Image (spheres, rainbow, N blue to C red):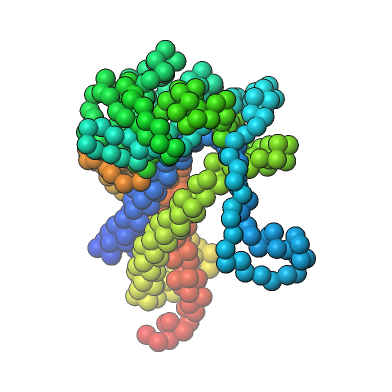
Amino acid sequence: MYHVIFLSLKLMFERKRQTFVSIIGVSIGVAAFIVMASLMNGFQKYFIEQAIDLNAHITLKVKPDNNPQEIVKLFFGRDTIAKVYGYKPKEEKDKITDYKYIIEKYSSSSNILGVAPHITSQVIVRYGTVEKAGNLIGIDPVLERRASVIDKFITNKRLNDLLSDRNSVILGKLLAKDLGIDEIGKKVIITTPNGNQQIFKVIDFFESGITNLDQVRVYVNLRTAQSILERPNEVNELIFKIKDVNMAERLARKIHNETGYYTESWQYAYKNFLQLFKIQNYITYMIVFAILVVSAFGIFNIIMMTVMEKKKDIAILKAVGYEEGDIIKIFVYQGFVVGFFGYLIGSVLGYSIQEWLSSVKIDVEGLVRAKGFILDRSVVYYIYGFFFSITFSVLASFYPSYKASKLNPVDIFRSG
């Protein structure tokens, strides 16, 4: 065994430059995989964690059925093909009639941690001469805490003030910024779709890091929202917090079957983003795969050239008793060594780039907001990097090794 390893290393050191280039190629592939996976998965995990924390695990609400084609089919049969050019939607309020019973029923469920009522509406928020559209959400702070982690995103932790001061409001951080409000205590006017207006005092800000939420969120007391919307004792949405977020889809279907109301899990609400993340992962792995394939071809070429140049040496080894398996091991060990050292250098390089990215302080604005790069420092990426580097390097060296083992010493000596 030792003599095989000695011969393998000797052949490698005879081609130092080519070996170094191969190692660098593998290390770049490993570093690229570690950094890209860390960036992609860091962003995705942050977004999903924020989405799960910010939005209900399950949402229950009324979904109006305004499908005119379905009505025609009820009268003329399911096989009827029709196109309706004009119809009048049903005039009905989006209210949950038995919401108190639903809250009481599911609050005692072992799989559900909390249920909270909402009444929501689009409103106009005015401060001075500036007007912005917002999404009004009337909440009960006590029940809201059980069904969400809203306190995590309230800047000054003054959610309880909604109970003591019915004319108080919590604005999304970006909405407040757009209005020109940078401190609490300011007065805003909220106008509802039915024309009602009321003055509210800003007591806190809602800052989640999700841009499209921070630009529209407006929280007020549930009773106050019902009053200005002229919908006493009504709610149009219930939110559920469950123990296992991965069970949201199944529990949503169960609640729908039991209540008859439309239910939506967080996975369904963000299905477009989850699909986009899958595409991002595919692109990342394809890029890394391409880098490693190029490195593998470099290893293949170097070992194949070594085999062609060392035919006589291989013939002598076989003549003195080396078997085909020994010849294969000599060259496969070269691939393993290149892969191993490529992994070590790539891991150090990847870790160094991660450290540098984590120290870079920039304002990231877009789908999410952050003060720098969001990284996932999982050790799994280093394990995958080791597997990929060794696998590609050994596979690249196997064919030249096999060709070397099949050389006929007699033919080589005859050819001179």
> Number of labelled discs?
0
Up-down relation of residue 268 to residue 136 (above or below): below
Q: Nearer the viewer, residue 414 or 80?
A: 80
Observer able to see residue 204 = no
In the picture, measured across the screen, residue 67 lies left or right of residue 24, that is right
Q: Nearer the viewer, residue 71 or 2?
A: 71
In the picture, measured across the screen, residue 305 lies left or right of residue 322, that is left
Observer able to see residue 367 = yes
Measuring from the top left, give residue 67's x and y in whole percent. 63, 57
Determine the residue positioned at 41% across, 28% down: 219
Up-down relation of residue 206 to residue 310 (above or below): above
Residue 77, located in which quarter of the rendered image?
bottom right
Measuring from the top left, give residue 265's x and y in whole percent. 58, 41
Residue found farthest to the bottom: 415
Q: Nearer the viewer, residue 100 or 358?
A: 100
Up-down relation of residue 159 to residue 275 (above or below): above
Measuring from the top left, give residue 252's x and y in whole percent. 64, 39
Q: Nearer the viewer, residue 178 or 415?
A: 178
In the picture, measured across the screen, residue 287 lies left or right of residue 233, that is left
Determine the residue positioned at 73% across, 70% down: 80
In the picture, measured across the screen, residue 180 lies left or right of residue 44, that is left
Up-down relation of residue 284 to residue 377 (above or below): below
Q: Where the C terminus falls, by quadrant?
A: bottom left
Determine the residue positioned at 58% across, 39% down: 93
Residue found farthest to the top: 164
Residue 157, located in which quarter of the rendered image?
top left
Measuring from the top left, give residue 274's x and y in whole percent. 49, 50
Determine the residue positioned at 57% across, 25% down: 233
